[in-house]
Image (cartoon, rainbow, N blue to C red):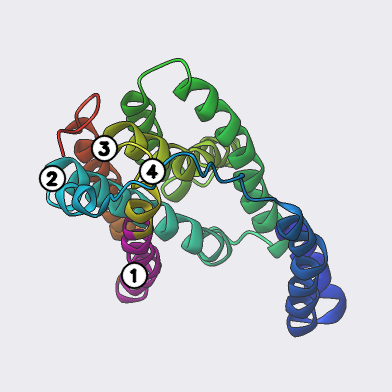
């Protein structure tokens, strides 16, 4: 999509390119959403009231750790991803085409990350897979921001993409393993909302640091610390079901 977006913007201007991309979403994605069918209801099974489970889960340490870890990890990822093109263009003087290639590499390997991390989650403890995903952020960010050689940036972008794809896949799996699936939707609503706040704030904060210092070095340190804090939160999670 970055390649396609760059091509459309060059040919028609960015406003028309945005309109065309929005049209693609409606034309291509919406019909598939409409074709998805709901699972049939089993009327022989009584509905279970899980409101007490929700209240209990929200008070537990594992839930707080999941929210903290998710927010830190998403902040590290969004702060990196949203500033990466600016960094490559302004600090490393990449052309628009070359910068788009790096971004596309990240997104292409995010597909690999979804499949790979899903495969690992079926065979190894999900907590360890989540920890691996979070540590990938902390280890790849320095190579993206502190090294100018394409031979280093490209593999780092690929590894960052693998982590990007695995994050949203592993989060509901770990949450379901600890709290069960009966209240998973409501818990994920809270977790994803908290993550959205971090996702919105982090790029702005890193951009402000770049404007104030003239370099992404301090922002890189902040992103690494956020990623490591998220990994520590995951490390403190229980291995199995929480006694909520």
- On the image, numbered disc 1 is attached to which residue? 201
Tag 1 or tag 4, which sits nearer the N-term?
Answer: 4
Q: Residue furthest top?
A: 123
In this view, which residue lies farthest toward the right?
11
Relative placement, left or right, of 66 versus 211 is left
In three-dimensional space, the C-alpha distance between marks 3 and 4, rounded to whole angstroms, equals 16 Å
| Distance between mark 4 and mark 1 Cα atoms | 21 Å
Pointer 4 residue:
142
Give the residue number, with chain letter if any, for mark 2. Answer: 60
- Give the spatial CA distance, label 2 vs label 4: 34 Å
Foreground residue among 56 and 156: 56
Q: Earlier in the sequence, mark 3 or mark 2?
A: 2
Q: CA distance from mark 2 to mark 1?
A: 26 Å
Residue 49 point in image, percent of width and height: 29, 50
In this rendering, the answer to whether 197 lies above or below 57 is below
Asked which secondary structure carries label 2, the reply is loop
Residue 236 highlighted magenta (yes or no): no
Q: Residue furthest front?
A: 44
At x 21%, y 46%, the residue is: 63
Where does the magenta region start and end?
190-212
Residue positioned 36% across, 69% down in the render: 210
Binning the other alpha carbons within 10 Å of mark 2 as few (below 14), some (14 to 19) or many (20 upward) gives few
Residue 153 in the image: state x and y as whole percent: 55, 42
Taking the spot 36% from the left edge, 63% from the top edge, the residue there is: 193
The reply to whether discs 3 and 4 touch (Cβ–Cβ < 8 Å) is no
Q: Is residue 155 left or right of residue 77?
A: right
Tell me the CA gap for discs 1 and 3: 20 Å
* One can see residue 20 in this view: yes
Is residue 223 in view? no
Q: What residue is disc 3 on?
A: 231
């Amino acid at each position: 999509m970055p390649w396609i977006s760059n091509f459309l913007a060059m040919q028609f201007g960015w406003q028309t390119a945005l309109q065309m991309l929005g049209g693609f979403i409606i034309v291509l994605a919406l019909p598939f959403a409409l074709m998805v069918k709901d699972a049939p209801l089993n009327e022989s099974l009584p509905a279970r009231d899980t409101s007490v489970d929700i209240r209990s889960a929200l008070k537990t340490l594992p839930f707080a750790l999941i929210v903290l870890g998710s927010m830190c990890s998403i902040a590290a990822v969004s702060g990196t991803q949203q500033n990466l093109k600016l960094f490559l263009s302004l600090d490393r003087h990449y052309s628009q085409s070359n910068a788009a290639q790096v971004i596309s590499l990240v997104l292409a390997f995010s597909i690999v990350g979804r499949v790979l991390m899903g495969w690992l989650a079926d065979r190894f403890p999900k907590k360890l897979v989540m920890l691996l995903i979070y540590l990938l952020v902390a280890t790849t960010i320095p190579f993206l921001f502190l090294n100018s050689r394409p031979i280093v940036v490209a593999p780092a972008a690929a590894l960052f993409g693998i982590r990007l794809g695995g994050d949203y896949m592993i989060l509901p799996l770990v949450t379901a393993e600890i709290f069960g699936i009966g209240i998973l939707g409501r818990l994920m609503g809270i977790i994803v909302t908290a993550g959205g706040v971090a996702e919105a704030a982090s790029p702005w904060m890193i951009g402000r640091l770049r404007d104030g210092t003239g370099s992404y070095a301090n922002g890189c340190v902040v992103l690494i610390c956020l990623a490591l804090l998220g990994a520590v939160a995951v490390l403190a999670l229980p291995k199995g079901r929480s006694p909520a």
